[in-house]
Image (cartoon, rainbow, N blue to C red):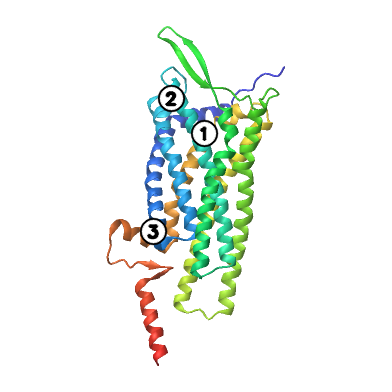
Amino acid sequence: MSSRPSINAGLKDFSIWYSSYHGYVSLCVCFSGIITNIFNLTVLSRKHMRTPVNQILVGLAVSDIITMVSYVPFAVHFYVVHPSNKSNSDKNSYYWMMFLLFHINLTTVTHTVSIWLCVILSIIRHLHVKSPSQVNMVRQRRIRQAKYLVLAAFVGAIIAMIPNYLTNELKPLRISTNQTNGTMYVIKSMRLGGNDTDPLVLTNVWLYAFVAKLVPCLLISIFGSLLLYQLHVKVRQRKQFLSVSGSSSRRLQEHSRTTKMLISVILLFLVTELPQGVLIVLSATKKYFFDTVYLPLGDVMDIVALINNAVNFILYCSMSTKFRQTFINQYFQCKHVKPVENGYTLSAIREKSDSQSNNNQV
């Protein structure tokens, strides 16, 4: 019989060292992320900001907010109030462990929602770049379809994660020391990578690895690449065959920046989620990998995912003029900042309209 391997000394030391800071770091990321995602939600839901892509981004902001709101009490109790890695009856009380199960199930769903919204985002943007439409009726139909897709992502993730709800369960442990006697609760071991792994546990792990990680990452890679190629083709065609005026050049630049911003969001998801998918597969196939590698890296994977949830506001502000100016107008009431409409200031639109009217009169 092979002996159970121990955790690599370097990885163990790093895990213990980082866990002492993880609670405080994650709380800073969560609080800032909740605020910035509220900004995203309020700005992108404005009437003049409603587009199919922005509907997806609104759903992404809602999912990220739910994730970080749930993470706050988890980080406070399990890392700040009880910083020790050792379990005890106060840290692992029945009600707090029930909350932990709820938190695990909820964040599993929201992470799944977020990555599938990213898939939908890449597909919708690719279709828009390939066949844009300025017809209002077509735009309104696409906006409604985007809303239905967001709803489908939430409902689909809740249903797909049912095996995860059934897999996780609490196990009571009686503790008796010189100082205290009591009962604490722990999550029952999944025994991944061994011959005695429960079939439901194995089904859940493979389902989560493919449905929530590997398949969406593959789709994101495919449609992200198509989006990059389509953008390159469109820019080249417009430069070669169109006589681009100054205003048209600004529109093309804004269009390109928006697409690049969405590609940045897509790449962040790939960097965050693909390694987790690989680690989950290795946990299911390699004996003791889950206990010796995956769990010690759990805090690192959590903070990377939280940072991914929190940085979208920075991307939107830095790469979208329309988002940035709408945000300033909404929250700072700067009257000297001119509102934008489809990449133009309203005054520029009026000037262009007046100019066209004068030319027609001539």
Alpha carbon separation for disc pair 3 and 2: 39 Å
In the orientation shown, which residue stands out farthest toward the right? 1
* Residue pointed to by mark 1: 105
- Label 2 CA crowd tier, 10 Å (few <14, some 14–19, many 20+): some
Q: Position of residue 253 (x, y in %)?
A: 48, 69
* Residue pointed to by mark 2: 96
Q: Earlier in the sequence, mark 3 or mark 2?
A: 3
Q: Residue 169 versus residue 147: which sits nearer the camera?
A: 147
* Residue pointed to by mark 3: 46
Q: Residue at x 62, y 53 (%)?
A: 221
Residue 47 badge = none
Q: Give above or below for 123 relative to 115.
A: below
Find out whether the residues at labels 2 and 1 contact each other: C-beta distance under 8 Å: no
Q: Residue 54 versus residue 344: which sits nearer the camera?
A: 54
Q: Earlier in the sequence, mark 2 or mark 1?
A: 2
Mark 3 vs mark 2: in front? 3
Q: What amino acid is found at the position of numbered circle 2 in the picture?
A: Trp
Q: Is residue 87 visible?
A: yes
Helix, strand or loop under label 1: helix
Helix, strand or loop under label 2: helix
- Label 1 CA crowd tier, 10 Å (few <14, some 14–19, many 20+): some
Alpha carbon separation for disc pair 1 and 3: 32 Å
Q: Write down the quadrant of residue 205 in the picture.
A: top right
